[in-house]
Each structure stands twice: as structure tokens, then as C-alpha cells.
């Protein structure tokens, strides 16, 4: 285990922690502005924050590295950023609409179903997973049910939006998996946010009545969500997913729900039942299980290859 790849899991877990701890800020922001307004402004803030980071990283590059950026690479970067931005816009806004018409617990569970959708889609994209990862996915799904679902389960109108949101987040993860090895992750993230912000703004002006004084009143949650949840965390996702099994990445990112519950427990003093603690424990077990190397595998090496892959973890 001395060559265990800790970098990608650590980056993805940090992204999940930021998303989970930002849940309070997002909830508070809804007290001042409508969903599309919040998503639009936070996304644009996230994009703006990354601009100085891009300039700084460019300054640190050697002339040889800058010379390697071809026209084709820039087109791939633009395509990847636009694709991620469109999907992110649809996913986040569908999630917000779904939350309005269903319980928060059910919303968390239905959104977490993307941990199953990603490996299923991976089969059709010739990116299969081994039995160990599938077992981890199933254990995590049970964990999320215990964590999020406290009452009965029945599908309502808002649940359809949340299921569509889970499918879109799955596509978002797979699109990042495709483009991240070929382009600069920070640049792609920046394009993603501006795309999401502009599209959300168009829908905002068509369906909502944004008011500048309401936006200014919500500056703290918007800034927190824009800088940390968007600018930092989504960029960490792109960097952390580079050359990494997307199904295992999905399990790590799904810890967002666990961190959200634990943050509420520690910071806000919210109580946790034995059922919820059991759910958290199962999800952590699933994540650890997916990280363990199988017999015959060499740890610390990229096992997710673009061509000729037969088995991953």
C-alpha cells in the first residue's frame, strides 16, 4: 500500500466537504433571492474568482508548456467547458425546483442515485467496474436511504425533477472524465461557470423578478457559495477526476451529504439518530471499500485507461 494514490481521493473528499458545509449558505440565500437568481449570481462569481488564478498559473508555466497549447487543444477546452456548463446549469436548477416540492431528505436520497447511474452508464461507454466497486455502490445506496429517508417513500411530481437532476449530474461526471485529461482543469471550470451563469440568467429574466437590493442582502451566502462551493469545489472536482475512475470519484463526491449532516451536527447542534449515524457509517465503508486495491492490482497507478480497458478496480 506504500504507493497508494492518495492525491485524487483527498482532492475529491475536500470538494465534497466544501459542498456539504456550504449547504447552510445555500439555504440562507433562498431567504433573499429566487433559485435561478441565486444560481446565476453564484456561478458568475465562481467564474470571476478563477480568472486571477488562471493568469497566475499561466505566469508559472514555462515557455515550452505554453507552446504546447495548440488551436485544437483550445477548441477542446472550449467544448468541454460549454458542455459542462450546460449540464451543470440544468442539473442545479432542476434540483432547486425539485427541492421546493419535496422533502429535503428525499431530495438528498434521489440526488444521490447518481452513484448508481454513473457505473450503469459506464457499461455502455465501455468503462466497466469490478465487483468490489459495485458492492461499494450498493452499500452506499443503502446508507443514503438510512441517512436521508425518515418516513415512507412515494414518488411525487418534484421527485421527477430530482431523478432528472441525478441523471444530469451523472452525465456531468462522465463529461469531466472525458475532457479533464486533455485540457487545463481550471480554465475548463471557469468556462463552465460563466456558461452556467449566463444560461441561468436568461432563464432568471424570463421566469423570475430579480432585484438588486435582494441580491445585495444575500451577499454573504452568495459569496460563500460562489467562491467556495462553485469556484473552489467544482474546480477541485475537475482536477481530482483527472485520470481517475469516475465511479469511485462518484462515491467520494457523494460524501457531500454525509458532511452536510455532520456539519449540521457539529456547528448547528442538530441531533443525529442511530439510523442516520448507521447511514453515515455505511457510506464511509463503501468509500473505503472502493479504494482498496484488488488482488493483483498495483496500487498508485492509473487503472482507468482510455483504450483497451477490460477491468477497473
Image (cartoon, grey):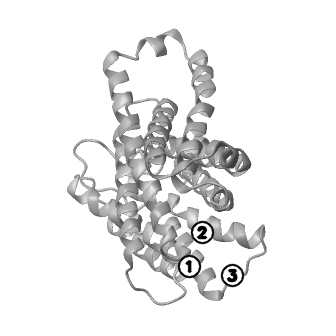
Residue lying at 68% horizontally and 62% vertically, measured from the top left: 24
Residue lying at 43% horizontally and 71% vertically, measured from the top left: 110
Residue lying at 59% horizontally and 44% vertically, measured from the top left: 42
Q: Earlier in the sequence, mark 3 or mark 2?
A: 2
Q: Residues within 10 Å of mark 2 (few under 14, many from 20)?
A: many
**Which residue is labeled 1 in the image?**
147
In the rendered image, the vertical position of residue 74 relative to residue 225, given as above or below? above
Residue 54 occupies which quadrant of the picture? top right
Residue closest to the eye, 104 or 240:
104
Quadrant location, the C terminus: bottom left
- How far from the left and from the top, in percent, is residue 298? 42, 51
Residue closest to the eye, 7 or 233:
233
- Asked if residue 273 lies left or right of residue 239, the reply is right
- Asked if residue 99 lies left or right of residue 78, the reply is right
For the residues labelled 1 and 3, the Cα–Cα distance comes to 9 Å
- How far from the left and from the top, in percent, is residue 1? 53, 55
Residue closest to the eye, 276 or 104:
104
Q: Residues within 10 Å of mark 3 (few under 14, many from 20)?
A: some
Q: Are marks 3 and 2 in contact (CB under 8 Å)?
A: no
**Which residue is labeled 3 in the image?**
272
Q: Earlier in the sequence, mark 1 or mark 2?
A: 1
State the mark number for residue 258. Answer: 2
Q: Residues within 10 Å of mark 1 (few under 14, many from 20)?
A: many
For the residues labelled 1 and 2, the Cα–Cα distance comes to 8 Å
Q: Secondary structure at mark 1?
A: helix
In the rendered image, the vertical position of residue 168 relative to residue 279, given as above or below? above
- Asked if residue 102 lies left or right of residue 26, the reply is left
State the mark number for residue 213. Answer: none
- How far from the left and from the top, in percent, is residue 25? 68, 57
Amino acid at each position: 500500500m506504500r504507493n497508494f494514490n492518495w492525491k485524487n481521493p483527498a482532492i475529491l473528499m475536500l470538494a465534497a466537504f466544501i459542498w456539504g458545509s456550504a449547504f447552510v449558505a445555500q439555504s440562507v440565500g433562498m431567504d433573499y433571492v429566487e433559485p435561478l437568481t441565486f444560481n446565476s449570481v453564484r456561478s458568475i462569481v465562481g467564474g470571476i474568482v478563477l480568472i486571477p488564478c488562471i493568469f497566475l498559473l499561466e505566469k508559472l508555466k514555462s515557455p515550452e508548456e505554453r507552446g504546447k497549447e495548440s488551436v485544437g487543444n483550445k477548441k477542446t477546452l472550449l467544448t468541454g467547458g460549454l458542455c459542462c456548463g450546460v449540464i451543470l446549469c440544468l442539473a442545479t436548477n432542476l434540483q432547486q425546483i425539485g427541492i421546493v416540492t419535496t422533502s429535503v431528505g428525499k431530495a438528498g436520497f434521489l440526488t444521490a442515485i447518481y452513484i448508481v447511474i454513473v457505473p450503469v452508464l459506464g457499461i455502455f461507454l465501455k468503462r466497466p467496474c469490478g465487483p468490489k466497486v459495485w458492492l461499494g455502490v450498493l452499500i452506499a445506496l443503502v446508507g443514503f436511504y438510512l441517512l436521508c429517508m425518515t418516513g415512507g417513500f412515494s414518488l411525487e411530481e418534484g421527485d421527477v425533477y430530482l431523478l432528472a437532476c441525478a441523471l444530469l449530474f451523472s452525465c456531468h461526471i462522465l463529461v469531466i472524465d472525458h475532457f479533464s485529461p486533455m485540457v487545463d482543469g481550471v480554465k475548463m471550470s471557469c468556462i463552465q461557470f460563466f456558461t452556467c451563469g449566463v444560461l441561468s440568467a436568461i432563464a432568471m429574466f424570463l421566469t423570475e423578478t430579480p432585484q438588486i437590493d435582494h441580491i445585495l442582502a444575500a451577499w454573504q451566502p452568495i459569496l460563500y457559495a460562489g467562491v467556495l462551493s462553485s469556484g473552489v469545489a467544482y474546480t477541485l472536482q475537475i482536477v481530482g477526476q483527472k485520470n481517475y475512475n469516475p465511479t469511485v470519484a462518484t462515491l467520494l463526491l457523494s460524501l457531500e451529504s454525509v458532511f452536510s449532516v455532520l456539519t449540521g451536527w457539529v456547528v448547528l447542534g442538530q441531533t443525529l439518530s442511530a439510523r442516520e449515524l448507521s447511514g453515515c457509517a455505511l457510506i464511509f465503508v463503501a468509500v473505503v471499500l472502493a479504494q482498496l486495491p484488488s488482488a493483483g492490482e498495483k496500487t498508485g497507478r492509473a487503472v482507468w485507461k482510455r483504450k483497451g480497458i477490460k477491468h477497473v478496480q
